[in-house]
Image (spheres, helix red, strand yellow):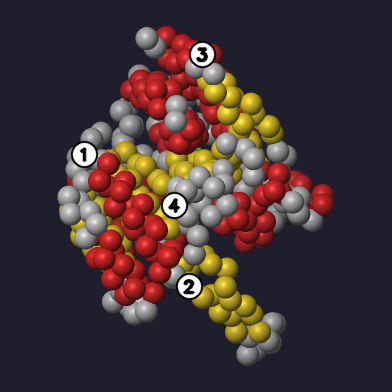
Amino acid sequence: MNTYKIAAIPADGIGPEVIAAGLQALEALARRDGGFALDVTHFDWGSERYKQTGALMPEDGAQQLRDFDAIFFGAVGAPDVPDHITLWGLRLPICQGFDQYANVRPTKILPGITSPLANVKTGDLDWVIVRENSEGEYSGIGGRAHKGMPEEVATEVSIFTRVGVLRIMRYAFQLAQSRPRKLLTVVTKSNAQRYGMVMWDEIAAEVSKEFPDVTWDKVLVDAMTVRMVKDPQSLDTIVATNLHADILSDLAGALAGSLGVAPTGNIDPERRFPSMFEPIHGSAFDITGKGIANPVATFWTAAQMLDHLGETAAATRLMRAVEKVCAEGTLTPDVGGSATTQQVTDAVCDAIRGEN
Ligand code: NAI
Ligand code: MG
């Protein structure tokens, strides 16, 4: 039997609520399946630790995570700590330190959940957004001079490397090739950004030659927002830069019903380091502690984690259970229901246990 070492970092806001739910579902699967076990270590890193010690995680934090098989992450961010401190103090050092360069964000309308788009139903919207996760606009390169003076200046430099763009394009083309429609849309902004984005386009065209069976097209990011809303059926796999995909995937989550159902995997495809799985949403201060956070995004990312670990049967079972519970109408308020986090979690665990 395989035992997987999982690092759980629930962190802030509703993070602990949804990670607890996710771990219950994973436990139910492990017990039901019998073929694998999870050895979960909890880390109390996050904004509370920052307020007490001045750091969100210990200095050797990444080192402590290195030998885990995967990281299961909640959300980071507190109302009284600036967002750039929380993001750069915990989530980004893990993503970048472990070179998790492919951020994979599946989106579809689950049965029982209504899209805000009129006439768009389950099946009409089934996308995977691949976000470049190691460089681009979030490279962290820049600085500020003349701080506080009238002549103050700030730079925020986007970095696009040939290696970085090549590897994310290959990943996206491969993923598109593995899906039934074999369809890839490359998001760009090469009309206005004439260096990095032009190289991005050129490398997409180069890599496309390695995948003659994949149909691909190129769309400017602004036009992409229109296409996602007006013609969701025309999209399948999507690849975009760090910033563009960050924004587009929130839109995708909303179009699929709620941010509360949108998952993501921060993947090191070469498996040199552990990959990290998390819901897309943040710490959601407005509903923290109310017991109504939607755990579906966390269940879905748990399924991504199981897939990554090679437990594909358990991943499929988990998604079947989630779809069944959604279809039956056991939903949290963000998707129009009145169930609590625990009620949805119990229903999903029951469905897992009841499955043949
Ligand atoms: P958010 O995702 O926390 O919340 C946006 C809206 O969606 C809120 O109305 C919230 O109640 C709702 N929502 C989010 N997740 C939900 C769920 N599971 N169930 C039901 N409703 C849900 O984004 P916001 O408000 O912009 O950010 C709050 C904090 O989270 C900030 O400090 C931000 O920096 C941080 N953040 C962290 C992320 C991460 O750790 N990966 C990602 C996004 C934001
Ligand atoms: Mg985001």
> Where residue 28 appears, x then y in whole percent?
53, 17
Viewer-proximal residue among 190 and 152:
190
Q: How far apart are marks 1 and 4 (CA)?
A: 21 Å
Q: How far apart are marks 3 and 4 (CA)?
A: 31 Å
Indicate the amino acid at tag 1.
Answer: Pro
In primary-sequence order, the first of circles 4 and 2 is 4
Count residues near mark 4 (Cα–Cα under 10 Å), then give few for <14, some for 14-19, many for 20+.
many
In primary-sequence order, the first of circles 3 and 2 is 3
In primary-sequence order, the first of circles 3 and 1 is 3
Circles 3 and 2, Cβ within 8 Å, touching? The answer is no
* Horizontal arrangement in the rendering, residue 4 relative to residue 203 (left or right): right
Indicate the secondary structure of the residue bearing disc 1.
loop
Count residues near mark 2 (Cα–Cα under 10 Å), then give few for <14, some for 14-19, many for 20+.
some
Q: Distance between the residues labelled 3 and 2?
A: 47 Å
Q: Which residue does the numbered mark 1 point to in the structure image?
A: 180
Q: Which residue does the numbered mark 4 point to in the structure image?
A: 102
Indicate the secondary structure of the residue bearing disc 3.
loop
The quarter of the image holding the C terminus is: top left
Viewer-proximal residue among 339 and 191:
191
In primary-sequence order, the first of circles 1 and 4 is 4
Q: Which residue does the numbered mark 3 point to in the structure image?
A: 34
Q: Which residue is drawn at the image coordinates 82% and 52% (left, top)?
A: 53
Q: Which residue does the numbered mark 2 point to in the structure image?
A: 158
